[in-house]
């Protein structure tokens, strides 16, 4: 597998939030949202799941209560039946019934999702999050802080880092136009993510505060 070099290249570091221009007499208001369990939320096809095998073997008897085991056995039987039909069509001896239904002694679990450390997981997850927020009007291009790109100079910025969406808006109070607009954008992002099946942590939601730790940086 080759690295796609996609959305991961745009991820800003927390230190880059220092580039926000705050006019004299104003302060930075912080907004933040975090997708809940983002990597497990993504589904992966069987072909990709087998590349995410875990370094453990389990007895079949330890897996019988799992839904994944039931799906595996159904797929295994169907595949064996297809092989039997193929052998019959070719005039070969079909597999005996015991070979079709025999339970394996050990199984290796595979993750049918994105996993930490996967080569392109950051690109896939960030790209999907970016698309959802952009389509929902929650990630304006003119306000986007991207690594290696010019910093927005309109006293506001949005930063996206995998499952974290962070925003800063300068103003004298939470009622200022820039701050209220940022809040509308973040609320739109919450709706868009929920509709896309990427629910956010309600307990990690931050709206218009002047002291917060985001992306590993403390904003005060």
Image (cartoon, rainbow, N blue to C red):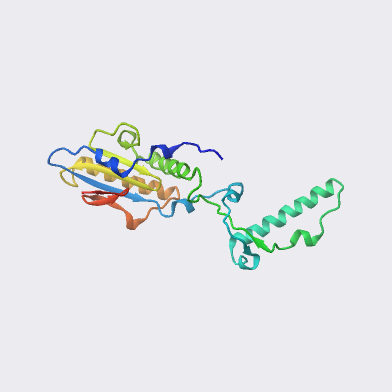
In percent of width and height, residue 56 lies at 59, 60
Q: Residue pushed farthest top?
A: 150
Say which of 188 and 40 sits in front.
Answer: 40
Relative to residue 168, is residue 3 drawn left or right?
A: right
**Residue in the picture at 15% in, 44% down:** 172
Q: Is residue 181 above or below residue 76?
A: above
Q: Residue pushed farthest front?
A: 55
In percent of width and height, residue 59 lies at 64, 65
Quadrant location, the N terminus: top right
Say which of 182 and 98 sits in front.
Answer: 98
Q: Quadrant of residue 129?
A: top left
Relative to residue 7, is residue 215 drawn left or right?
A: left
Say which of 85 and 53 sits in front.
Answer: 53
**Residue in the picture at 43% in, 50% down:** 198
**Residue in the picture at 64% in, 60% down:** 107
Say which of 79 and 122 sits in front.
Answer: 122
In percent of width and height, residue 206 lies at 28, 52
Q: Is residue 105 above or below residue 206?
A: below
Q: How many discs appear?
A: 0
């Amino acid at each position: 597998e080759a690295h796609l070099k996609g959305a991961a290249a745009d991820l800003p570091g927390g230190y880059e939030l220092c580039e926000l221009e705050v006019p004299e007499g104003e302060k930075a208001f912080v907004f933040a949202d975090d997708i809940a369990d983002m990597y497990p939320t993504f589904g992966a096809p069987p072909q990709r799941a087998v590349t995410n095998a875990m370094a453990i073997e389990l007895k079949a008897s330890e897996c019988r209560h799992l839904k994944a085991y039931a799906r595996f056995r159904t797929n295994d039987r169907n595949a064996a039946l297809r092989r039997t039909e193929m052998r019959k069509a070719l005039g070969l001896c079909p597999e005996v019934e015991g070979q079709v239904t025999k339970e394996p002694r050990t199984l290796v679990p595979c993750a049918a999702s994105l996993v930490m450390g996967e080569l392109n997981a950051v690109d896939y997850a960030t790209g999907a999050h970016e698309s959802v927020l952009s389509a929902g009007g929650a990630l304006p291009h003119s306000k986007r802080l991207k690594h290696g790109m010019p910093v927005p100079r309109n006293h506001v910025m949005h930063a996206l880092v995998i499952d974290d969406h962070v925003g800063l808006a300068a103003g004298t109070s939470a009622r200022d136009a820039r701050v209220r607009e940022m809040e509308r954008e973040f609320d739109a992002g919450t709706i868009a993510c929920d509709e896309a099946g990427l629910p956010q942590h309600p307990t990690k939601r931050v709206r218009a505060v002047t002291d917060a730790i985001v992306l590993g940086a403390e904003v005060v």
